[in-house]
Amino acid sequence: MSKRIFFIISIVVVLALAFSGPAMAQKKRFFGIATGGVGGVYYPVGGALAQALTNKIPDMVVTAHTGNASVANVNLLGRGEVESGIAQNNVALAAYTGDKEAWKTPQVKGLRTISALFPETVHMVAGAKTGIKSVYDFKGKRIIVGDKGSGTEMDSRRFLEAIGLSYSDIQPIFVYYAAAVQRMQDEQADALFWTAGVPISSIIEIATTKDVVFLPFPDDVISKLHSRFPYYAPVTMPAKAYPKQPNPVKTVAIISLWVTRADMDEKTIYDVTYHLYEKTPQIYREKKEEVSGSDMMAAAHEQGKNVKLENALLGVTVPLHKGAYKYYKEKGIQVPAALIPPEAK
């Protein structure tokens, strides 16, 4: 071998060794959070959480993905196409148990919870010109019931049933946030159902640009819903939560969950749960301020203020992931037997 060739090979080997160390040191874990559409609540809180975790966990890159929210997110998890997502607790339960009445796609037995997040309130809003004064005026009307297969659409079917109606009694409109706003503004829909954290920007936009009426759930409907589906809890939307909403509104709410897959690495889920609640330095910030993921969610949206450790198991309907379970045990939180991961028993 000539000296020249030997020299070139030596340089290549030295460069390879020189760059292999940093490359190995910089190996990253990638973690996705499936959220919802722009105009909803999942999108801003999920984005804030992703940003927080990326800024707090040195070897992790967390990204938030926009999408069609609860049902779509759980299906993505069931197919192994995302690491985590946000979903309504009733949707999560239907998927986990394979409820044939509510869940039309394959059962997601491996669904696991990281944490409860915030309450999602059912909004019923009607155009003032429609003459709709109560939910019992919906018959024959054009009602937005949420996008097909969404959590809101699942809820809408149950609400109509509790009122004594079905899709055959109304003109159902299956659209998502932006399209719902446009339909209401153009008076191509008479009313809508929407399940989301208060306030939701799409409802603000509708109420700002049109004369609307916020409809309460009648007491008998609330009682009927809660007795059959206990996760629909009676709540009152505070007065002035939206433009043209001067009075409190009786309604129901469910809880949103941050969910994942049972086959996700225990350390990864422990790390994201830990940094959701623990104040640690933001490593990419000049002053390295100490914040928790929930702090950043609270700064992004009013509902983020409800993401608290004391609420972490509130309304949880499927078992915890082993990594989250480990964190809560370390914090001295009593985990109900039904939420203990099957893998940990």
Image: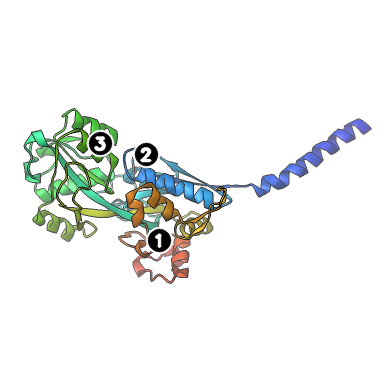
Residue that numbered label 3 is attached to: 205
Report the side of 301 relative to 30 (left or right).
left
Kind of residue at badge 3: Glu
| Residue furthest to the front | 287
Give the residue type at disc 2. Gly
**Mark 3 secondary-structure assignment:** helix
Q: How busy is the neighbourhood of tag 2: few (under 14 within 10 Å), some, or many (20 plus)?
A: some
In the shown orientation, is residue 313 left or right of residue 56? Answer: left
- The answer to whether residue 75 of the structure is visible from this angle is no
The C terminus is located in which quarter?
bottom left
Disc number at residue 67?
2
- Picture quadrant where residue 333 is located: bottom left
Helix, strand, or loop for circle 1? loop
Q: CA distance from mark 1 to mark 3?
A: 37 Å
Judged from the image, the secondary structure of the residue bearing numbered disc 2 is loop
Between 77 and 10, the one lying in front of the other is: 10
Q: Residue at x 39, y 49 (%)?
A: 299
Task: Give the quarter of the figure containing the N terminus.
Answer: top right
Select label 1 or label 3 by which is in front.
Answer: 3
Please state if 135 lies on the left or on the right of 59 as rendered: left
Q: Which mark is residue 320?
A: 1
Q: Is residue 200 left or right of residue 284?
A: left
The image's colouring method is rainbow
Could you tell me which residue is drawn at 48 percent across and 50 percent down?
A: 52
